[in-house]
């Protein structure tokens, strides 16, 4: 038995539910900050780090997620984030030290097909940081998280400006973490159940300019559930998000925790539905048409020249004059 969660929304809403296809993807520039790693207590170290990187969100395709004796229609989505970190790190007894490094996040999510809220996910995040006190050493942090979410009543996606949607969530999270510092490795596992309320308010419609261009977008104030692009270890309570019906996803997102911004993503390029890839830009499509026309003309010229050479080779040579025929230079015998 297969069930589909959710109810139908208004067909003429401002915020419209997109239809995703395999290969749809969005690439973002992301910035974030982190003050501590989960599981790393103050006796082991603390710091303040800035992160800069790139995030790709890619639709894999439809998938069925088992739930008891049924299954739920979902969309499988892969998110990958990579980038650099820098800041300061303080260890008791050593004082502060500069830190540089990299981070990588890979996450697979399954979005239910009504409001596109994640109901299952698995992800890994790795931080490799270089710390220099008297001698250089590496701080290596690895997370692996599995989460499943139950939704009491799935909200509708389609909303008008001024409308509100909410849902009660119960999420089971299983987090495994490993820390290696000064040659010592420490691992731990935490499992917990979290009850929360997801909310979304559609505030206004406005034009948003990002690296990919300027898009008509809807400003949303919503719970930052599944903030794609923030590596594991960065918490976010709510976000200001800008959703574009033309793009099929967000043009910009700003995540906040206790009133302070902890992360931002800005659309760099995308490919969605039947729209041309955004890398074509304002002049890209006309230039592409010109290139196609020029290529066609060159092909025609080449074909005509080749045809002319073939005709010349195929034509028989002109007959030569027979000996002794005509001409005044022949002598009578």
Image (tube, grey):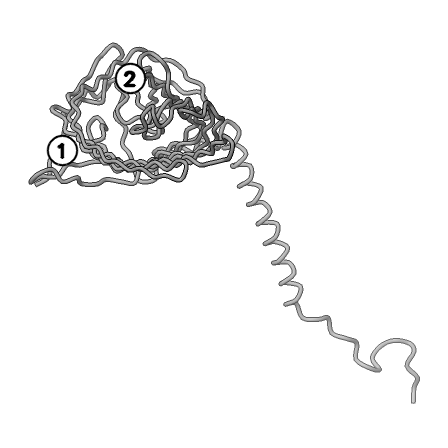
Name the outermost residue toward the front.
Answer: 93
Q: Which mark is residue 4?
A: 1
Badge 1 density bin: few <14, some 14–19, many ≥20, Cα 10 Å: few
Pointer 2 residue: 238
Residue 110 appears in the rendering: no
Q: Quadrant of residue 124?
A: top left
x and y, in percent, of residue 161 in the image: 27, 12
The quarter of the picture where the N terminus appears is top left
Image point (32%, 30%), residue name: 232
Image point (17%, 25%), residue name: 194
Q: Earlier in the sequence, mark 1 or mark 2?
A: 1
Residue 95 appears in the rendering: yes
x and y, in percent, of residue 206 in the image: 38, 13
In the drawing, does residue 171 fall left or right of residue 104? left
Image point (40%, 24%), residue name: 92
x and y, in percent, of residue 307 in the image: 61, 58
Name the outermost residue toward the bottom.
Answer: 333
Q: Quadrant of residue 19?
A: top left
Q: Nearer the viewer, residue 49 or 332?
A: 49
* Vertical relation: 290 (above or below) 282: below
In the drawing, does residue 327 fall left or right of residue 175? right
């Amino acid at each position: 038995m297969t069930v589909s969660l959710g109810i139908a929304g208004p067909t003429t809403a401002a915020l419209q539910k997109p239809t995703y296809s395999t290969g749809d993807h969005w690439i973002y520039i992301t910035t974030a900050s982190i003050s501590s790693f989960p599981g790393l207590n103050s006796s082991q170290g603390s710091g303040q780090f800035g992160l800069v990187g790139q995030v790709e969100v890619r639709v894999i395709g439809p998938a069925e997620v088992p739930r008891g004796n049924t299954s739920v229609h979902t969309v499988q989505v892969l998110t990958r984030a990579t980038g650099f970190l820098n800041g300061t790190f303080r260890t008791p007894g050593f004082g502060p030290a500069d830190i540089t490094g990299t981070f990588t996040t890979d996450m697979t999510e399954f979005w239910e097909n009504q409001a596109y809220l994640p109901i299952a996910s698995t992800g890994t995040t790795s931080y490799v940081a270089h710390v220099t006190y008297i001698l250089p050493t590496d701080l290596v942090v690895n997370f692996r998280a599995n989460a499943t979410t139950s939704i009491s009543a799935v909200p509708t996606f389609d909303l008008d400006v001024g409308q509100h949607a909410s849902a009660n969530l119960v999420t089971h999270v299983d987090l495994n973490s490993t820390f290696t510092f000064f040659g010592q490795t420490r691992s731990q596992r935490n499992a917990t159940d979290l009850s929360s309320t997801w909310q979304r308010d559609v505030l206004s419609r406005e034009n948003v300019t990002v690296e990919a261009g300027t898009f008509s977008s809807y400003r949303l104030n919503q719970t930052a559930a599944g903030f794609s692009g923030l590596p594991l270890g960065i918490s976010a309570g709510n976000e200001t998000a800008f959703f574009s019906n033309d793009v099929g996803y967000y043009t910009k997102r700003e995540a906040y925790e206790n009133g302070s911004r902890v992360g931002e993503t800005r659309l760099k390029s995308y490919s969605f539905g039947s729209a041309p890839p955004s890398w074509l830009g304002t002049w890209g499509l006309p230039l592409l048409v010109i290139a196609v026309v020029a290529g066609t003309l060159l092909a025609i010229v080449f074909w005509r020249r080749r045809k002319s050479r073939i005709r010349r080779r195929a034509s028989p040579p002109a007959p030569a004059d027979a000996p002794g025929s005509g001409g005044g230079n022949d002598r009578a015998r």
